[in-house]
């Protein structure tokens, strides 16, 4: 018997970053939108914990215990006192979320494996407990579980669900190489040296634009405080952003810590045009379109305990 969970990618429509905290993390006002690119995580009882992955970027996915999906299974088993064969699962990730950075692909697999194991094992963890385990795995993991749209505060893990009044159409351009999230935050700190970094706050205009489902208003309000740091480490991303803008995108920004870049379009047709122009521009590795909001991690095949 197996359980499969479908879990979406995200884009950050606002990422306001505060000064470094004593623990090295940064307080954020992080507005997440889940978009329709999905991984599917399937868990099956096995002799030992094992991770496999299939998909276009599968060779870039670690299959050891650094994989958030493996860590999620171990964390749930430990909390519920499951050990040995009881907690041994084969986790298979059917990966469609680009392994590029900035779209929470690893976080999605963590949230997906957690929900899948909870269903398979019948551990019936409360929503609160699942969110707590997610927060222990990484700052973006709780949002992968919840999906839709949410404001993340603290280091991004404390979520408030947001109302969204329509569907937003996006184009994503994947870069030819990666960017390390800690390195981007360190570059943010370097660029902020000697400056007064304000408390991160969610933009009223941005929350209103989401609530109205108004792409023009959203385009005017999107922002990412990590973008200068990402561009400083990866200057060629400026060419990708310029190519998307020239193709008529309403807004162009780095997604999260990058290097994936995100382009907002007014409707699906104009998104397809921007995608085509980006493909032709030669400024990125691959291009995908997706719209959101979409739901968070969802069980798509019922397990014995579901
Ligand atoms: O929480 P997560 O494992 O995704 O964070 C990866 C890294 O990103 C952290 O080790 C830290 O360097 C940086 N980070 C941060 N402030 C946050 C979230 C992440 O400095 N709020």
Image (cartoon, rainbow, N blue to C red):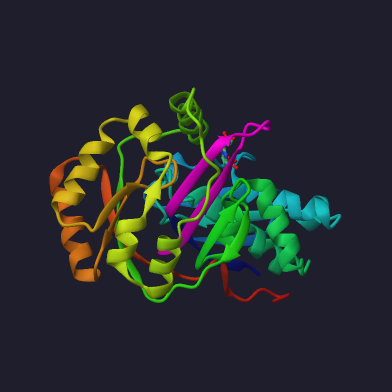
Residue 126 relative to residue 183: left or right: right
Q: State the image coordinates of residue 286 (x, y, percent, origin top left).
A: 27, 48
- Residue in the picture at 61% in, 45% down: 155
Q: Main secondary structure of the magenta part?
A: strand
Along the line of sight, the residue nearer the viewer: 99 or 143: 143
* 290 shown above or below 87: below
Q: Residue furthest right?
A: 81
Locate residue 299: give its quadrant.
bottom right
Residue range corresponding to the magenta coloring: 13-37
Locate residue 216: give its quadrant.
bottom left
- As for residue 34 lying within the magenta part, the answer is yes
Q: Tell me if I can see residue 229 in this picture.
A: yes
Q: State the image coordinates of residue 97 (x, y, percent, origin top left).
A: 42, 54
Locate residue 79: give its quadrant.
bottom right
Q: Ligand 1 sits in which quadrant?
A: top right
* 277 shown above or below 121: above
* 215 shown above or below 185: below
Along the line of sight, the residue nearer the viewer: 201 or 24: 201
Q: State the image coordinates of residue 150 (x, y, percent, origin top left).
A: 53, 63
């Amino acid at each position: 018997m197996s359980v499969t969970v479908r879990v979406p990618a995200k884009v950050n429509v606002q990422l306001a970053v505060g000064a470094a905290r004593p623990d090295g993390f940064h307080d954020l006002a992080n507005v997440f939108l889940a978009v329709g690119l999905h991984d599917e995580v399937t868990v099956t009882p096995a002799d030992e914990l094992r991770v496999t992955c299939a998909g276009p970027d599968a060779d870039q996915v670690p299959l050891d215990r650094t994989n958030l999906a493996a860590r999620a299974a171990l964390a749930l088993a430990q909390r519920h006192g499951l050990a040995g064969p009881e907690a041994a699962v084969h986790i298979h990730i059917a990966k469609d979320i680009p392994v590029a950075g900035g779209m929470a692909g690893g976080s999605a697999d963590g949230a997906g494996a957690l929900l899948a194991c909870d269903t398979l094992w019948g551990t019936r963890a409360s929503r609160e407990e699942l969110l707590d385990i997610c927060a222990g795995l990484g700052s973006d993991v709780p949002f992968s579980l919840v999906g839709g749209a949410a404001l993340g505060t603290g280091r991004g893990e404390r979520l408030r669900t947001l109302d969204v009044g329509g569907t937003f159409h996006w184009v994503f351009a994947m870069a030819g190489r990666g960017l390390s999230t800690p390195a981007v935050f360190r570059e943010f700190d370097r660029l902020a040296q000697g400056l007064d970094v304000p408390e991160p706050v969610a933009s009223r205009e941005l929350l209103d634009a989401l609530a109205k489902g108004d792409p023009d208003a959203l385009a005017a309000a999107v922002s990412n405080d990590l973008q200068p740091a990402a561009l400083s480490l990866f200057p060629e991303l400026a060419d990708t952003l310029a190519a998307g803008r020239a193709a008529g995108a309403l807004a162009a920004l780095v997604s999260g810590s990058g290097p994936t870049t995100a382009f907002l379009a007014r409707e699906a047709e104009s998104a397809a045009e921007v995608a085509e122009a980006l493909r032709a521009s030669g400024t990125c590795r691959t291009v995908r379109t997706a719209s959101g909001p979409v739901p968070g991690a969802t069980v798509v095949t019922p397990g014995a305990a579901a």
